[in-house]
Amino acid sequence: MDLPARPLPAYLVRRYQGWKATDFAENQAWYRRLADEGQRPRAMVISCCDSRVHVTSIFGAEQGEFFIHRNIANLVPPHQPDGRQHGTSAAVEFAVKALKVAHIIVLGHSHCGGVQGCYDMCSGAAPELEEESSFVGRWMDLLRPGFDALPEGDEAERRRALEFAAVMTSLENLMTFPFVAEAVAEERLALHGLWNDIGDGGLCCYMPDAKAFVPV
Ligand SMILES: [Zn+2]
């Protein structure tokens, strides 16, 4: 069977050629060094796939600085060594064991469609996500306990609280990986929980003492 792969759309070819002639041309030595010496990122970032979350822009990061994994709603599943395929867990394992990153940043965000889907599913408004065949629904099952623990109140506040819960769930689940827990205990690795407001550019960091997300 022929793979159904087509040539790149013209607008992307033009953009690529523009990058090659400018950014790349101006930093050729840096790219060569990255290629020859390999990557040594100090931090892993786990963020949502959402196109509005511009991980490298908000931290002014250069190539080689962040080891980035993105998935729906920036979720890390619990440690589950069952011999099956676990993309997120594989990325965490590689970051901690091979790259020996010093930081893992879980970056949540406002207006998260994945979190909203979870909210709708758990409140009965999205039955299609309850179907066994829904990859999004089964992935968002990771956040069901977060939904069940939401305080009563205003719906907009509850939805926001669930975005925070997605970050906290990931931090808790990260600690179920023995190699993460060990690196944290030995202070070789620090975990951070962040949440980015898409509309106003705000960034909040989870502070355990306050048990709250506090503006950076
Ligand atoms: Zn999202």
Image (spheres, rainbow, N blue to C red):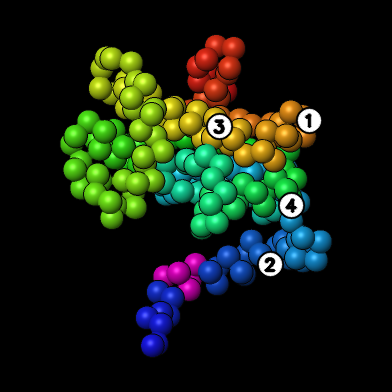
Q: Position of residue 8 (x, y in %)?
A: 44, 76
User: Few, some or many C-alpha atoms within 10 Å of disc 2 (few <14, some 14-19, many ≥20)?
Assistant: few
Looking at the picture, which amino acid does disc 1 mark?
A: Glu
User: Few, some or many C-alpha atoms within 10 Å of disc 3 (few <14, some 14-19, many ≥20)?
Assistant: many
Is 23 on the left-hand or right-hand side of 99? left
Which residue matches tag 3? 171
Going from N to C along the chain, the mark reached first, 3 or 2, is: 2
The magenta region covers 10-15
Looking at the picture, which amino acid does disc 4 mark?
A: Ala
**Distance from label 3 to label 2 (Cα)?**
39 Å
Q: Is mark 4 within 8 Å of ligand 1?
A: no
Going from N to C along the chain, the mark reached first, 3 or 4, is: 4
Looking at the picture, which amino acid does disc 2 mark?
A: Ala
Farthest bottom residue in view: 1
Secondary structure category for the residue under label 2:
helix
* Numbered label tally: 4
